[in-house]
Image (tube, helix red, strand yellow):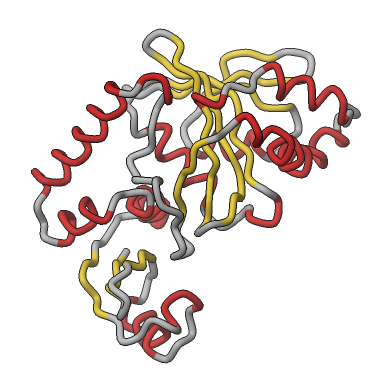
Amino acid sequence: MYILRCSDSSYYTGQTDDLENRMQQHDSGQHGYTATRRPLELVWQGKFETREAALIFEQQIKGWSRAKKEALMAGDWDRVQQLAKGRSTLRQAQPERGLLPERDVSEPDQSGELSFAPVGAADFEPMHELRMRAMRESLERVGRFDPQRSRERLAAGFQPEHMHHICRGSERIGFLTLLPEGEAFNLQHLYVDPDAQGEGAGAWAMAWVQSHGRDVRLSALKQSRANGFYQRHGFIQIGEEEFDIQYRWSAKP
């Protein structure tokens, strides 16, 4: 995994099995975001035992603030922890906004990196449409595709204070709803637009959810590909209903 400083002072985070070759690709303008931001400087690199571990850490870093990334580059882990605690303090000081992501989302991210943005009441319709696109194939597979029922279910669980848009740059590509339930969480929604799936957004969002150190429970539609996604992220089946499967992830091994 690596971080580059671009000519406009923005940071690019990526991963590769061959850093030397990847740097040559960046330097020759073969990667979209960095192609117009050369020259580039390699400011941090790290090795991981597995590609999955590297991907999870990459998605976490993409959600970090600039200050936290720079603390990592400097090898100042005390500062990294301080900044993480500072965000925890912010979350406690603003409970009306629910759980806030570690990234400062007060300004739109134009870099193409992943980030969160707050949800408002006026966002219901586009979020309903995104949910329908994400769920349609799975719902049709089990004979449950019904736009009106889908609208009613999202309306019943629409709590903007606990919801976050998932953004790539300035584009909204998904959303999640994370509800506190005692010492645990209920991940009520996690949807990524089909056009943006397979690019790490879901894994990035899940890494953020699990980073809070609390158990997480959720349900997934039977025969949905989401079941495999949750299982790959450590969720264990704990129950089953007519159409849904219940899962739980334990923060303690």
Tell which of 110 and 133 is nearer to you.
Answer: 110
Q: Is residue 155 left or right of residue 237?
A: right
Residue 125: image x %, image y %? 74, 36
Residue 100 appears in view: yes
The residue at 31%/27% (across/down) is: 91
Tell which of 114 and 224 is nearer to you.
Answer: 114
The residue at 22%/51% (across/down) is: 68
The residue at 64%/33% (across/down) is: 227
The residue at 31%/82% (across/down) is: 20
Q: Is residue 103 left or right of residue 126?
A: left
Residue 253 appears in view: no
Residue reaching furthest to the front? 122
Q: Is residue 151 left or right of residue 32?
A: right
Residue 116: image x %, image y %? 46, 44
Q: Is residue 124 left or right of residue 15?
A: right
- Asked which quadrant contains residue 195, the reply is bottom right
- Asked which quadrant contains residue 111, the reply is bottom left
Judge whether 3 appears above or below 127 on screen: below
- Asked which quadrant contains residue 104, the reply is top left
